[in-house]
């Protein structure tokens, strides 16, 4: 709608719903046309862009566009108030589980809003509802099947499960995959960035290391980027020694002090 009125405010401000931009939009909706007066509504660092704002606010706004702009701003204010109301209600209801939220929030990739969603879907008594992490992941449909017969792989889609919990954990996995120097940055020696499917990030093993401990009165402790190497330390050493011996070297292994 602003483009139709030849107003290029979005090309100057980074957030069209910021404080300064909303003040300008409200003034336009109320009938103000002078770009200089509109640019004077800029606050803080936005004041440095007054010349650019004057050029961006030179437009031709008719009465219909003003009405639509006022309607949109009123609707945005209404939605903002409703979001704040619901946030306060959620905060009041989860106030009894602040310790659980704090533990979940300590997990990389999981923010406070996501902890509230996980808590709402799983509940605070996960230990009595799910015997193991594998049961939890299966219930959340985060365990893809393996259907192979006579050397042929068939469809093995995961079930639908709890879509709200699944979306939250998938979002957390996508966020966590970008972290560095953590145990999940490598999957069997392959960088997580090369693993396109996010489901492997939430296998039962990883779910047990990231979700269940939070409900077992434990803070999250990262296993380290060399976690998988330590799990296969013996086989790595044996393979490396065999290769060196095949090349004609004599290998003597001793632990570093």
Image: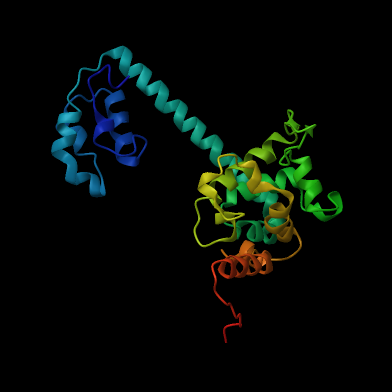
Q: Residue 35: horizontal and vertical position, in percent?
A: 17, 29
Q: Nearer the viewer, residue 239 or 214?
A: 239
Is 106 on the left-hand or right-hand side of 120?
left
Residue placed furthest toward the front? 248
Q: Nearer the viewer, residue 197 or 230?
A: 230
Residue at position x 37%, y 17% from top? 68
Is 245 on the left-hand or right-hand side of 152?
left
Q: Residue 43: horizontal and vertical position, in percent?
A: 26, 45
Residue at position x 64%, y 63% from top? 220
In the rendered image, which quarter contains the N terminus? top left
Q: How is the image coloured?
A: rainbow
Residue at position x 75%, y 45% from top? 137
Q: Is residue 124 above or below residue 65?
A: below
Q: Residue 86: horizontal and vertical position, in percent?
A: 60, 40
Decide if residue 223 is in sight here. Answer: no
Q: Is residue 210 above or below residue 5?
A: below
Image quadrant where residue 154 sits: top right
Is 240 on the left-hand or right-hand side of 77?
right
Image quadrant where residue 138 sits: top right
Decide if residue 176 is in sight here. Answer: yes
Q: Residue 38: horizontal and vertical position, in percent?
A: 21, 33
Is 113 on the left-hand or right-hand side of 40?
right
Q: How many marks?
A: 0
In the rendered image, which quarter contains the C terminus? bottom right
Image quadrant where residue 2 sits: top left
């Amino acid at each position: 709608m602003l483009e139709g009125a030849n107003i290029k405010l979005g090309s100057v401000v980074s957030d069209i719903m910021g404080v300064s931009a909303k003040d300008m939009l409200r003034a336009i909706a109320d009938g103000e046309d002078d770009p200089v007066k509109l640019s004077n509504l800029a606050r803080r660092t936005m004041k440095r862009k007054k010349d650019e704002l004057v050029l961006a606010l030179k437009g031709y706004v008719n009465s219909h566009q003003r009405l639509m702009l006022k309607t949109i701003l009123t609707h945005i204010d209404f939605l903002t108030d409703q979001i704040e109301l619901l946030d306060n209600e959620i905060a009041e209801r989860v106030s009894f589980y602040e310790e659980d939220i704090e533990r979940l929030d300590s997990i990389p990739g999981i923010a406070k809003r996501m902890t509230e969603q996980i808590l709402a879907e799983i509940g605070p008594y996960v230990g009595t509802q799910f015997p193991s992490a594998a049961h939890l992941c299966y219930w959340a449909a985060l365990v893809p099947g393996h259907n192979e017969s006579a050397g042929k792989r068939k469809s093995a889609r995961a079930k639908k499960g709890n879509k709200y919990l699944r979306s939250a954990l998938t979002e957390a996995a996508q966020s966590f995959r970008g972290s560095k120097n953590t145990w999940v940055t490598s999957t069997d020696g392959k960088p997580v960035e090369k693993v396109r499917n996010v489901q492997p990030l939430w296998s039962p093993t990883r779910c047990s290391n990231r979700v269940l401990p939070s409900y077992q009165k434990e803070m999250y402790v990262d296993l380290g980027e060399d976690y998988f190497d330590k799990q296969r330390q013996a086989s790595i050493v044996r393979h490396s020694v065999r290769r060196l011996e095949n090349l004609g070297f004599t290998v003597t292994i001793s632990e570093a002090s």
